[in-house]
Image (tube, helix red, strand yellow):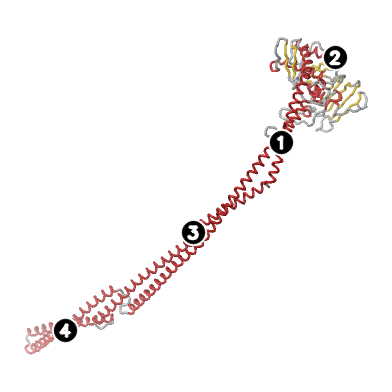
Amino acid sequence: MRINKMTASFGKLENESLSFHPGLNVIYAPNESGKSTWCAFIRAMLYGVDTAERARAGYLPDKLRYAPWSGAPMEGSMELTAGGCDITITRSTRQKNAPMREFSATYTGSSVPVEGLNGSNAGEMLTGVSRDVFRRSAFIGQGAVAVTGSPELEKRISSIVSTGEEQTSYSEADERLRQWQRKRRYNRRGLLPELEGKMDEAQRRLELMEDSLQDIESLEKRLEQAGEECRQLEQQVTDSRKRQRREALDRLSKGRGEAERCSAEHDAALAKLSQCREDMRNSRFGLQSLSETEEQVQRDMGQLKELRERASQKPSALLAIIFFVLAIAAAAAYTALGNIVVIIAAAVFCAVAVFLLMGYSKKRQAINQALEDRREILRKYQVSGSGELAAALEEHRRLAQAAEEAEREEKRCRLAYENARELQRGLEENAMAELDFAAGSSEAARLSRELNEARDRAQQLSRQIAEMNGRLAAMGDPLVLSSALSSMREDYDTISKEYEAISLAVDTLKEADTEIQSRFSPELGKLAAEYMSAVTGGRYLDVFINRDFSARTRTSGDSIAREAEYLSAGTLDLMYLAVRLAVCELALPEGENCPLIIDDALVNLDDTRLEQAMELLKQIARDRQVILFSCREVRGTDHD
């Protein structure tokens, strides 16, 4: 196949065209001029744009990366020669989410479609290899000179150096066997670990069931003992309550009888006190206190005695009469005698008589007043004399003493009644405490609490038994579980044998692959060594290629090959370019060769090795078209 011309609306390319000729084509252009975009366009025209790729950190898929900057649809055409025919293929975009999905292939200069060529198989039909093999052989992207392995590339090279069968790959077979291995065991995952876990779980559940049955049996025995203890305590509580009720009622009855007796005595004492007070109220002195009465009576009796003594005095008017007679006699004598002395004496005798008469009158009034006062005092007490008053005082003294005695008796009875009432209240409180069979301190209360504790223990045991029975029921039937465990063990043995057989197959396959590699690597290494020697002027003689296409090389003066890490950037690019060319030689189909696309793969070479590399590319270009995009001008070559 040979590319003749391309026209692209792709990325920064806006309906731009590029033409090629057979042999070596060198397209020189500075950086950021679209060289890598043209390379990506070639791949997109042949194999289409992968719309399944998604953007991720540090990576943009082609459908986004090469969307036209102008906003126009992604599209293009490629004129090429294949199988002796000139063909024009075009790709265009109808739906934005499916860029370059629309495909057509016609013979150049006509509208006749190329039969059997479509958008899905165009690349493989024209180049002879799949997208994966093309990308790892004939397509050398910028900074991607090194070859990376893939099952498709491995199958293709193996088919060439061994049997010619392109449907087998050690990597695929090894990966499939290892997938089978991983399916059965991979670290802690896989069928075997899963079965081990299930068997361990089943065995654990069986052991747990057995332990649970033993625990349930033990708990049921304890529950039976707790039930018997509850029955005994219930009988003790019943007997104790009856006894305490009887004793409490007896004490209450006795206390109530004593209170009633004290109440009756107090009522009698109160009645007697009331009667005594009534007798005093009806007496001469009423409810007056004895001390006041005695004081008053003693005072009044003394006054009576004094008044009696005062009233008992008898005043005499005789002396006044005598002096009055003398005054009359003197007056008569004066009349008779006419003597002044006599008249004076008569006047004196008259004055004395008047004076004495006035004194007699005053004493008589005092006696009458004393008699009146005495009568007044006797009237106050309603007695006729001091003796009767003394007798009334004695009677009042007797009544007062009787009232005082009755009052003392009433106080004594009242105190006794109050004590009886207090005792009764104490008995009632004690009875309430004794009859409180929950929180009291009596024997019945203590037994009640022990009974409640025993019942709680029994209920707790019942709950534990119910919970364990529930968990046991949730675990399933032990017979079914044992049967399942036996079946799992049989499956485990079968899968273990399969795992051992697969492991043996992996080892056997590895041995076979080692034998194939003994033919695969030397063939590829031989071609790569020839190319490496050509581009280094014979300095590097050997190239050793591993299965993953990593490589080592050795100079003529080295005893051992150098790893890639010990090579300069230019030598490393040359080594992998040689490997690429060898892969192209072995992987690409014979006959009409696929073009070799190179994007700035020689930037790390010095002038001498660049010329040597270009000489090698010229030799290769004799058999296949080589398209080299470069930012460096190469002397001695024609370029566009």
Q: In x, y percent, where is residue 100?
A: 83, 29
Name the kind of residue labelled 4 in the image.
Answer: Lys
Separation of disc 2 and disc 3 at Cα? 118 Å
2 vs 3, front mark: 3
Judged left or right of residue 276, residue 314 is left
User: Residue flagged by tag 1: what amino acid is it?
Assistant: Asp
Q: Which residue is mark 3?
A: 445
Locate residue 54, reporting x and y percent: 75, 31
Between residues 186 and 605, which one lies in front from this camera angle? Answer: 186
The first of marks 2 and 3 along the sequence is 3
Which label number is shown at residue 493? Answer: 1
Q: Is residue 430 visible?
A: yes
Q: Say whether disc 2 or disc 4 marks the residue closer to the N-terminus.
A: 4
Q: Which mark lies nearer to you, 2 or 1?
A: 1
Amino acid on which the number 2 mark rests in the picture? Arg
Q: Earlier in the sequence, mark 3 or mark 4?
A: 4
Q: Of label 4 and label 1, which has the lower sequence position?
A: 4
Task: Tell me the amino acid under the disc marked 3.
Answer: Ala
Q: Secondary structure at mark 3?
A: helix
Q: Quadrant of the N terminus?
A: top right
Secondary structure category for the residue under label 4: loop
Query: Disc 2 designates what residue?
Result: 622
Q: Position of residue 198 (x, y in %)?
A: 68, 40
Element carrying mark 1: helix
Mark 1, Cα crowd under 10 Å, few <14 / some 14-19 / many 20+, is few
Q: Are marks 4 and 1 in contact (CB under 8 Å)?
A: no
Packing grade of label 2 (10 A; few <14, some 14-19, many >=20) is few
According to the image, label 4 marks what residue?
314
Observer-side mark, 3 or 4, equals 3
Quadrant of the image containing the C terminus: top right
Task: Give the mark, 2 or 1, whose residue is nearer the N terminus.
Answer: 1
